Image: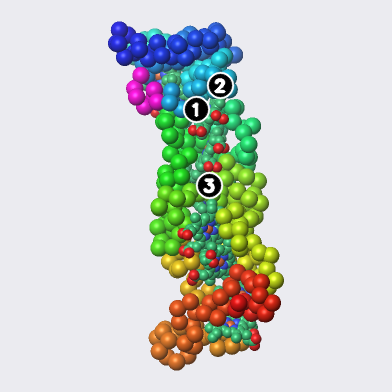
Amino acid sequence: MESPTISRFSLVTCVLLLSSSVAFAQTSTDSESTYSRAGADSCIACHEDAATMSIFKTPHAVPTDARSPFGSGQLQCEACHGPGGEHAGRVRRGQERPPVIRFGSGTATTIVEQNGVCLDCHSGDAGFAWHGSGHDDNEVACADCHQVHIAHDPVLQTANQPDVCFDCHQQQRSQALKPYSHPFSEGKMDCSGCHSPHGETTDRLFVRQTLNDTCFECHAEKRGPYLWEHAPVAEDCSTCHDPHGSNHPGMVSLRGPMLCQTCHSQADHQSFANGPDGLADGTASKYLLGRNCMNCHTQVHGSNHPSGSKLMR
Ligand code: HEC
Ligand code: HEC
Ligand code: HEC
Ligand code: HEC
Ligand code: HEC
Ligand code: HEC
Ligand code: HEC
Ligand code: HEC
Ligand code: HEC
Ligand code: HEC
């Protein structure tokens, strides 16, 4: 206890927490668990490692913010880890130290209890519709995505967020590695451009009411209105695009003309798809080279030209 490091940290928190010592007279209704006498000071007497201490560099340790765990009248470490009086106390030889709340999958604390701690303070935040979301239903923990003992939580950084999600979403990881994708690997875009991980009341956690409205957030020019609409575009962009990445230019799910011919019969006009021998077999129009159907039908998202009904201008 004489260690100079420990007393320095204690002094720091004493200053931070001067006005909040009153909180620690509080005891839980459960007689087994009480709050520690000295709050964070008792905890960091034993947990003074750098990883634990970096919580003081985060928005959770703002003494001037009354809502913060370190704000006046709040419970500091125990606002999250629960009553730690017995845990922080003397433990007889051979006896186990009574546990406190731990976070993340694979700890003794249930996910529901863990998330309950966080939601006590956060369920009122804007955009929070956690209950019943895909992540809630599957018992994903807040702490599976968030790290709170770190100055810059990776999931809140555009460049680092996708890696947090890819831990569980392997299929999207492999799509994002394909040659044509939204610029995830360049660190210019993250998943929360399109998804709201706390569960919006929308399908697949989209940030806007529908899939297309989500795309229009950034690709507003595709919204139209068009004089000549192309029905599948107005309906669902993902009919033709793989938003997480694909092997084809323009992030389309199939190479043209096959993409177009999933709906359009080739019988109508000369628009044969490449045969197994490519164009050399004479069955395909030379116009199907390169951008193929789009050589002529350039306005595949819709046209505003008076004679654009065939999406050619
Ligand atoms: C007297 C020393 C001591 C004090 C004071 C103390 N702890 Fe601990 N704590 C430990 C030890 C030792 C462990 C390792 C696990 C065990 O033995 O149960 C631990 C484990 C933990 C763990 C789980 C991490 C792990 O590696 O198992 C958390 C979280 C924790 N303590 C939080 C707190 C909080 C919050 C306080 C203040 C209320 C606190 N501790 C006070 C000694 C202490
Ligand atoms: C005692 C209340 C309280 C508890 C408990 C709490 N938080 Fe917070 N949290 C806050 C406050 C206050 C802020 C700062 C909000 C602001 O600045 O608008 C915050 C901010 C955050 C932020 C944003 C951080 C940033 O860098 O912008 C995240 C993420 C967060 N909390 C997650 C959690 C998680 C996960 C838990 C549970 C392990 C949790 N919180 C428990 C009060 C709390
Ligand atoms: C699937 C991953 C994931 C889970 C699980 C998750 N979050 Fe988040 N959280 C994020 C991301 C991503 C952001 C940034 C959102 C953005 O950029 O719009 C965020 C932002 C936040 C913020 C900052 C305020 C804000 O909305 O910008 C708070 C507070 C927060 N989360 C709390 C929680 C709490 C509490 C839980 C558990 C009930 C939780 N989160 C579960 C990924 C997650
Ligand atoms: C806002 C809620 C919150 C506060 C306040 C908080 N912690 Fe934590 N603590 C967590 C979460 C969540 C984790 C899991 C790792 C992470 O997300 O960074 C954790 C992890 C830990 C660990 C490692 C435990 C393990 O399971 O490996 C220790 C030790 C710990 N905290 C001690 C403390 C001490 C000491 C304080 C006060 C100085 C404190 N915590 C304040 C939420 C909190
Ligand atoms: C700890 C594992 C885990 C992490 C980390 C995680 N997810 Fe999930 N996610 C799941 C599970 C489990 C489901 C539900 C089953 C499924 O659809 O695969 C899910 C579902 C989803 C869904 C579909 C929801 C629906 O209603 O159809 C989206 C979108 C999603 N996650 C986005 C994200 C984003 C974005 C991140 C990172 C910010 C993320 N996830 C991080 C586990 C995780
Ligand atoms: C450009 C918008 C966009 C971005 C950015 C985005 N998604 Fe999606 N996501 C979608 C669309 C659209 C769907 C539904 C169609 C589909 O699955 O292809 C979807 C569906 C999902 C699903 C559910 C899949 C299913 O089978 O129901 C998961 C999980 C998911 N995305 C995870 C992620 C992750 C992780 C990231 C970040 C790497 C991410 N998404 C980034 C648009 C996006
Ligand atoms: C948060 C902004 C954002 C949202 C939302 C968004 N995109 Fe994008 N999109 C981008 C950026 C950035 C690029 C890359 C532009 C560049 O490289 O010049 C891009 C490029 C594209 C490309 C062209 C790819 C290429 O290789 O030429 C397509 C197709 C695309 N997005 C489709 C979609 C679809 C479909 C949706 C809705 C599911 C969507 N986007 C939602 C930002 C967004
Ligand atoms: C009928 C199929 C189809 C649908 C549906 C569709 N697209 Fe496209 N999109 C294409 C094709 C084909 C390309 C051109 C690919 C290439 O360059 O080879 C393209 C290219 C793009 C590009 C990159 C080039 C450009 O024009 O800016 C963006 C962005 C884009 N689409 C967004 C969208 C959005 C947003 C939606 C939904 C509103 C949508 N697409 C619906 C077929 C479609
Ligand atoms: C998901 C199905 C689907 C896909 C894929 C699709 N289309 Fe269409 N397309 C339609 C429908 C439906 C119409 C409206 C037909 C009508 O009004 O009779 C249409 C209309 C058209 C028209 C105008 C036809 C007319 O008679 O006015 C052209 C040209 C066209 N599509 C070209 C394309 C091209 C080029 C592609 C590939 C990039 C493509 N389509 C992919 C469903 C699709
Ligand atoms: C060499 C230019 C050219 C190419 C390449 C081309 N088209 Fe056309 N397409 C036309 C013209 C011109 C019309 C208008 C015919 C008319 O008005 O009688 C048309 C009409 C259409 C129509 C409207 C229905 C019809 O038969 O009038 C559809 C659908 C269509 N094309 C789909 C496609 C698809 C799918 C491909 C690729 C497999 C394709 N086109 C390739 C020139 C082309």
Where is residue 96? Give x, y as percent: 39, 17
Residue 177, which numbered label?
Answer: none
Numbered disc 1: secondary structure = loop
Position of residue 237 relative to residue 49, above or below, is below
Does residue 40 appear in the picture of this structure? yes
Per the rendered image, the range of residues in magenta is 48-54
Mark 1, ligand 2, within 8 Å: the answer is yes
Is residue 219 a member of the stretch shown in magenta? Answer: no
Of badges 2 and 3, nearer the viewer stands: 2
Q: How far apart are marks 2 and 3 (CA)?
A: 27 Å
Q: In which quarter of the image is the N terminus?
A: top left
Q: How far apart are marks 1 and 3 (CA)?
A: 21 Å
Q: Are marks 2 and 1 in contact (CB under 8 Å)?
A: yes
Residue that label 2 marks: 65
Question: Which of marks 1 and 2 precedes in the sequence?
Answer: 1
Q: Give the prevailing secondary structure in the magenta stretch.
A: helix
Where is residue 240? Give x, y as percent: 55, 67
Where is residue 92? Give x, y as percent: 36, 10
Residue that label 3 marks: 192
Question: Which of marks 3 and 1 precedes in the sequence?
Answer: 1
Where is residue 186? Give x, y as percent: 40, 52
Does residue 99 appear in the picture of this structure? no
Residue that label 1 marks: 59
Please tell me which residue lies in front, 121 or 286: 286
Mark 3, other Cα within 10 Å: few <14 / some 14–19 / many ≥20 = some
